[in-house]
Image (cartoon, rainbow, N blue to C red):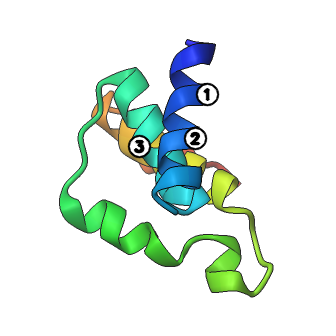
């Protein structure tokens, strides 16, 4: 798995200039067999430190988006996925 992630991150982030959030979504999607509607990845275009404003890291943003999609697909309700 480490080799897959290393290769995929290099390809997406370094070679194709895909931001961290989308890189995370794509890698986790492939690892867990999750496919996204095109709008999902389009929406994540600005999620790299909030469009360069140094807000939340894109790695965290992408992971949180993935968790919501994946766990919802397993039948979890919102309250169980992200409780306060």
Q: What's the distance in space between the residues labelled 2 and 3, CA to CA?
A: 13 Å
Residue 23: % across, % down: 51, 49
First of labels 1, 3 by sequence position? 1
Dot 2 crowding, Cα within 10 Å, few <14, some 14–19, many 20+: some
Q: Nearer the viewer, residue 10 or 52?
A: 10
Residue 61 in the figure: left or right of residue 44? right
Nearer-the-camera pick, 27 or 68: 27
Residue plotted at (56% across, 53% down): 13
- The Cα–Cα distance between marks 1 and 2, rounded to whole angstroms, is 6 Å
Q: Is residue 79 visible?
A: no
Q: Quadrant of residue 76?
A: top left
| Residue 65 relative to residue 69: left or right | right
Residue placed most toward the observer, 79 or 62: 62
Q: Quadrant of the N terminus?
A: top right
Q: Most extreme residue toward the right, as rendered?
A: 54
- Picture layout, residue 47 above or below residue 11: below
Of mark 2 and mark 3, the one earlier in the sequence is 2
Gap between marks 1 and 3 measured at Cα: 13 Å
Question: Label 3 near label 1: C-beta < 8 Å?
Answer: no
Element on which disc 2 rests: helix
Task: Please tell me whether mark 1 sits on a helix, a strand or a loop.
Answer: helix
Location of the C terminus (image quadrant): bottom right
Horizontal and vertical percent position of residue 18:
49, 60
Marks 2 and 3: CB-CB under 8 Å?
no
The residue indicated by pointer 3 is: 26
Q: Residues within 10 Å of mark 3 (few under 14, many from 20)?
A: many
Whether residue 33 can be seen here:
yes
Q: Secondary structure at mark 3?
A: helix
* Residue 69 position within the rendered picture, expressed as x and y whole percent measured from the top left: 37, 45
Q: Which residue is mark 1?
A: 6
Q: Who's the residue at 55% across and 63% down the image?
A: 19
> What residue sits right under mark 2 in the picture?
10
């Amino acid at each position: 798995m480490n080799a897959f992630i290393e290769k995929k991150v290099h390809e997406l982030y370094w070679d194709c200039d895909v931001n961290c959030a989308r890189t995370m979504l794509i890698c986790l999607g492939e690892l867990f067999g999750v496919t996204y509607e095109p709008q999902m990845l389009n929406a994540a275009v600005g999620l790299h430190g909030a469009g360069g404003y140094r807000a939340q890291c894109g790695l965290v943003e992408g992971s949180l988006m993935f968790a919501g999609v994946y766990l919802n697909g397993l039948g979890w309700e919102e309250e169980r996925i992200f409780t306060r």
